[in-house]
Amino acid sequence: MANKAEAVSLRKGLSEVVEVILDHDSFVLLEHQKPDGDCVGSGLALVQALRSLGKQALLVSDDPHPAVYDFLPGRRFHTRAGYLKPEDFHPQVAIFLDCTDPERAGRGLEFAAGKVWVNIDHHVSNRSFGAVNLVDPTAAATGELVYDVINELGIPIDKDIATCLYVAILTDTGGFRYQNTTKETHLLAAELLERGVNGSEIFDCVFETRTVSSIMLLSKVLSTLKLYRGGKIASVTLTQEMMRASGASSEETEGIIGYPRSIAGVEVSLFFKESDEPGKVHVSFRSRSLVDVAAVAQSLGGGGHPRAAGALIDGTIEEVTEKVMSYLDKLDVWTDF
Ligand code: AMP
Ligand code: MN
Ligand code: MN
């Protein structure tokens, strides 16, 4: 087998992760809350790979998988934390995927108590909380790291596994458009295409298939557009009332932040989403080229990447907007461009 890992030096932590997997028989794979394409794709790829080795493995998420990923193979090995009792499932190892810290797994964390923790992630803000940690912020997606793990285990990457990994990478790079997309990302995508992945069909399923309710919601959210700092900051807002009126589900808000982000001259874009948890607002941050929004989100209790981050903040939309804007006001970058 062409082994990409042999050509370059092994990523730090890779051999330890592989050793833990080889030494154990049963695994729970945990995704972060409100799972995105990266953790869904990484999880479905790894659960199928572990099963192909004859291991017992189950992928568990607190929230449901967004319906847009229903076409992915391996769903029979996935369940939600609320559907299974921790006392009925005793894996030896818990593998956290795409989680900056263990709490990101939400109720999935109940299945990790007393197990060996494996941490596979690409967030700069990752807390290295595992017994073994494969954390590489230069990876565009956790899916890239899962590819290395599967490859290093010597498991053949069939079309099903390749499709899941392709979705992980496709979604976290915004369709190979964000700055995290490197030559290595494209080389890996090419390798996955070689395994039979249908790139155009997947792109159509993931990015070009919308529900009527999501378009209705989009029109409401876009009507809230506000600009600050002479057009360098743009924000949009979503209330629970808009969700009810449009009939959209929370996963259908994915991608909306791309609109304020795309406005000429905007450096930072913000998406304030009233949470279904009362008294909390989820804020998505995006920046074009200068502002480290991971640092901003982290100081407000969240995390993420330099160009894409998020945080769940206490307060009403007005209070949270005020909190975020006054924090951004203090940054000394606004005169630089
Ligand atoms: P989002 O805008 O919610 O799609 O999130 C953008 C990025 O920020 C993703 O990489 C998330 O993993 C990260 N992120 C979002 N919410 C949080 C949070 N509450 N804590 C830590 N990281 C987060
Ligand atoms: Mn993620
Ligand atoms: Mn990710």
Image (cartoon, helix red, strand yellow):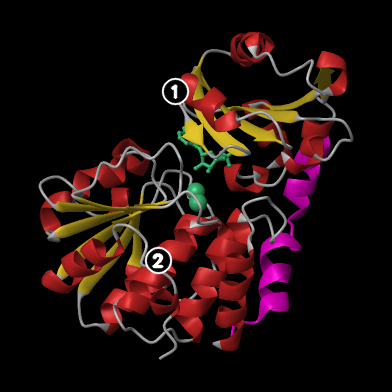
**Label 1 lies in ligand 1 vicinity (Cβ under 8 Å):** yes
Q: Distance between the residues labelled 1 and 2?
A: 27 Å
Q: Over which residues does the magenta segment extend?
A: 196-219
What amino acid type is highlighted by mark number 1?
Answer: Gly
Q: Is residue 323 above or below residue 138?
A: above
* Image location of residue 64, percent across then percent down: 45, 52
- Badge count: 2
The answer, for residue 13, to whether it is visible in the render is yes
* Image location of residue 58, percent across then percent down: 28, 65
Q: In this view, does 55 lie to the left or right of 104?
A: left
The answer, for residue 278, to whether it is visible in the render is no
Residue under pointer 2 = 146
In the rendered image, residue 290 lying in the magenta stretch gets the answer: no
The numbered dot on residue 301 is 1
Q: Is residue 48 left or right of residue 199?
A: left
* Image location of residue 57, percent across then percent down: 24, 69
Residue 128, located in which quarter of the rendered image?
top left
Q: Earlier in the sequence, mark 1 or mark 2?
A: 2
Q: Residue at x 87, y 30 (%)?
A: 265
**Is 88 or 290 nearer to us in this picture?**
290
Quick one: SS at disc 1? Answer: loop
